Amino acid sequence: MNIIYLASEAYPFCKTGGLADVMYALPKQMKKLGHNVSVFLPKYDVIPNKYLYDMKYLDNVELNNEIYNLYKYELDDIIYYFIENRTFYERGHIYGDLDEDVQYANFCEIILKFLIKLNLKFDIVHCNDWQTGVFPYFLKTRYNKLSCKIIYTIHNLQYQGRFNNYSLLNLGYNYPKYSINFMQIGIENSDIVNTVSPSYAKEIKYPYFAEGLEDITNSKNILGILNGIDYEYYNPKYTDIFNYKKEKKKKLLEYFNLPNTNDMIICLISRLVEGKGLDLITARIENILKNDSIKFFVLGSGQKEYEEFFQYLSLKYPDKCKVCIGYCEELSLLMYEGSDLFLMPSRYEPCGLAQMIAMRYGTIPLVREIGGLKDTVTPFNEYTKVGNGFSFTNFNADDMLYTIRYAQKIYYDKKEEWNIIVKNCINTDNSWKRASKKYEKIYMN
Ligand code: ADP
């Protein structure tokens, strides 16, 4: 099969969140399963120079008096196509501008133009998130000579691409509504729609999670396919996991200029946004910092109020709390390797990759039972010894606090049990091998 992926970000070129990880790993797995795979991305100026310099120019097309160039870069036997346009994709950042509707509507239409001009073969187009939502609509209404099956994946229903369609009308997109919702258009016009975990697929039928799209999510069959993580990229090398953790913990403490200690290290690596459950953390983390023998390390960026809160904490508890505001792949790996407990108390979570990465490095996740967190983390049962983490059900700060204290009790007083959970974590199969077979099945059926 010839499979084309469309997305607004993909590792290693540009990444702001889990979508980029998926767009790196899933195409690679499909290639391994014997398919021809290509990925279309905007050619942002924030892509590292080592990739930008080696891209090969292929062709150009015109849309609304703008020229768009197509570049190609091959990595792991996958062809990455990049759409270049100075006006729209060279702004020193990826998201957040007021004309995102035009940026991504044009991205979708230009891809269609190149598919025709270069006569590229494709059986499946796999669209991802709101930025690619209008692709199936344009294909049906303007380029209906092209035939293919369209899969649309909702990675996060909170970001829908809702716009007043004034600017689109100006560009000649005659979408017959007063306002425009890219994600809704994607869901309505695709052949198969899925989201990234079975639990989230069920949750988004309810208004609380559907973010205003409950009529749409209830009118469509939405499959739930759990993401995986790339086991070649996240590949800790150890013969003994416990020695490995000890060494990495020492390194992590050194990084933060702290003396070596056996204190439990709790870490948070996250976009600092409300949906990640940060209000629970801000409400109770000081109880723990004041009273308990722990370290708390934070890496992330996002809403100002959370960034400022964590900076305040690191000043107030310099021996216990260290905070790095920003995005740093290297430090994130060091934290996954060297921490004991990974905190992820999300209010909602379509799938979540961070908890899977933590498990791969023997760092035990403590999560709220929601969406993909519920599907990947089984709370430890002291009697059966089954379970790869700790969890709580309600979005309640005291429940989170209680669960962190329970985890500490096991860590300090029942080391054997703690070690069983660590082993259960590293033995959990969160690989893309499992997930990619499910995608292959829906591509083929
Ligand atoms: P989301 O896509 O909602 O942000 P996921 O858990 O699915 O959440 O994926 C987050 C990914 O981004 C993980 O790979 C995580 O390690 C990474 N990440 C998040 N924040 C940072 C950061 N500040 N620095 C480095 N990596 C980060």
Image (tube, rainbow, N blue to C red):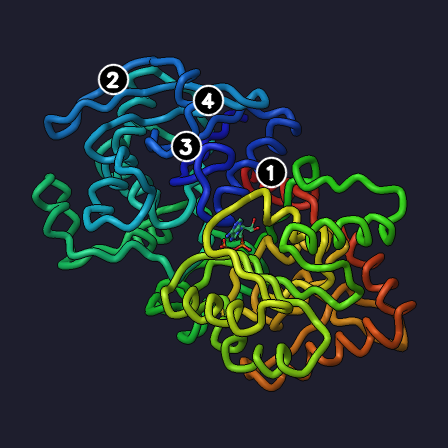
Q: For the residue marked with disc 1, what is the amino acid?
A: Glu
The residue singled out by tag 3 in the image is 148
Q: Is mark 4 within 8 Å of ligand 1?
A: no
| Marks 1, 4: nearer the viewer | 4
Instruction: Tell me which label, 1 or 4, sits earlier in the chain.
Output: 4
Residue 99 in percent (x, y) is at: 19, 46
Quick check: marks 1 and 4 in contact, CB under 8 Å?
no
| Marks 3, 4: nearer the viewer | 4
Q: Name the residue located 29 percent from the left edge and 26 percent from the top edge.
A: 84
**Distance of label 2 from label 3 (alpha carbons):** 23 Å
Q: For the residue marked with disc 2, what is the amino acid?
A: Asn
What's the mark number on residue 60?
A: 2
What's the mark number on residue 50?
A: 4
| Marks 1, 2: nearer the viewer | 2
Q: Name the residue located 81 percent from the left edge and 59 percent from the top edge.
A: 422
Instruction: Tell me which label, 4 or 2, sits earlier in the chain.
Output: 4
Q: For the residue marked with disc 3, what is the amino acid?
A: Cys
Residue 15 in percent (x, y) is at: 46, 42
Quarter occupied by residue 287? bottom right
Quarter occupied by residue 90? top left
Q: For the residue marked with disc 4, what is the amino acid?
A: Lys
Q: Mark 4 Cα within 10 Å, few/some/many (few <14, many 20+)?
A: few
Quarter occupied by residue 362? bottom right
**Distance of label 4 from label 2 (alpha carbons):** 23 Å
Query: What is the quadrant of the N terminus in the image?
Result: top right
Q: Mark 1 Cα within 10 Å, few/some/many (few <14, many 20+)?
A: some
Residue 12 in percent (x, y) is at: 51, 33
Position above or below: 286 against 249: below
Q: Mark 3 Cα within 10 Å, few/some/many (few <14, many 20+)?
A: some
| Marks 4, 2: nearer the viewer | 4
- Front position in the image: 128 or 321: 321
